[in-house]
Amino acid sequence: MANRVSLAPPPRANPKDASAQPPPPPPLTPRRLLGRLADTPHSHARVAVVALGLGAALGGGVAWAALAQTDRPLGLYAAFLALFHFMEYLTTAMHRHDVGINSFVLNHSRQYHFALVFGLVEYFVESYFWPQYKLLDKWTILGCFLVLFFQSLRSFAMMNAGANFTHLISFRKEDDHVLVKDGIYKYLRHPSYTAFFYWAPLLQLCILKNPIAFGGYICALYYFFSTRIEIEEDVLIRFFGKEYLEYRKQTWVLIPGIQ
């Protein structure tokens, strides 16, 4: 038996179905092109852009120090700064999920930015009057090793602390917050602070050859860390009680004048 052919007209489209269609894209503007890069301060896109910039500064700084004819210390300075800020983000992101642009600590504080500018101003002033003191020499090489050592110490301390490390003092104890007492923390309290206390002045003295900034950095960092450590240890005593008091008796803070 042959198949029947229907002569009925095709069904009409339901006008309501048109409303289910996605709306047309918004006008092509810079904001639409940038997407989350423009709208979300801590998006993956912004993190990628900052990391790319730091990588370029690191590579460009090393190239400048190796190939330039003048101001070669500035290349090393830029490279070490870029490495520091990149490692701040990386070592935090390796253990915490609440990371963002702030974890690069590029916007640390006005005082931090002032210190960086002061060091550069001193470098250029002294380079103009005494250029013979702003050259790469054996002290620069020694300084590079020392700066890398203290950078490594800080990064390792942050990794050792894991999710317990935060750039800001936490006044509320998280459920998974534990007192870290192994690794470098078996011998030193606040090893990341100790590392930065030596890292920053050495950049000024050994890389930029800035004696004034070197002294200023030591004074400013001593005041900052002595105050911060006192506050932080009061918080840790509140968190862990006798356990922290016993731990404090068995460890050292390698910053002169801080027990």
Image: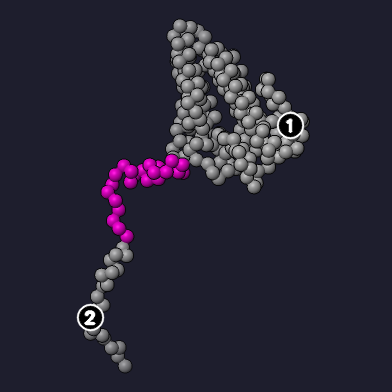
Residue at the spot of label 2 = 9
Q: In which image quadrant can residue 14 be found? A: bottom left
* Crowd around label 2: few <14 · some 14–19 · many ≥20 (10 Å): few
Q: Is residue 59 visible?
A: no
Instruction: Provide the secondary structure element on which disc 2 rests.
Output: loop
Q: Mark 1 points at which residue?
A: 248
- Magenta-colored stretch includes residue 167: no
What is the distance, in whole Å, between disc 2 and disc 1 at their CAs? 88 Å
The percent coordinates of residue 215 (x first, y second) are 57, 14
The range drawn in magenta is 22-44
What amino acid type is highlighted by mark number 2? Pro
Residue placed furthest toward the top: 129
Q: Residue at x 70, y 34 (%)?
A: 185
Nearer to me, 75 or 46: 46
Does residue 102 appear in the picture of this structure? yes
The correct choice, above or below, for 92 with respect to 152 in the image is below
Q: Which residue is drawn at 43% across and 41% down?
A: 41
Q: Nearer the viewer, mark 2 or mark 1?
A: 1
Q: Is residue 90 above or below residue 26?
A: above
Position of residue 143 measured from the top left corner of the image (x, y, whole percent): 59, 19
Sequence-wise, the earlier of marks 2 and 1 is 2
| Neighbour tally class for label 1: few under 14, some 14-19, many 20 plus, Cα within 10 Å | some
Q: At x 47% / y 22%, what residue is drawn?
A: 114
x and y percent of residue 109 in the render?
49, 28
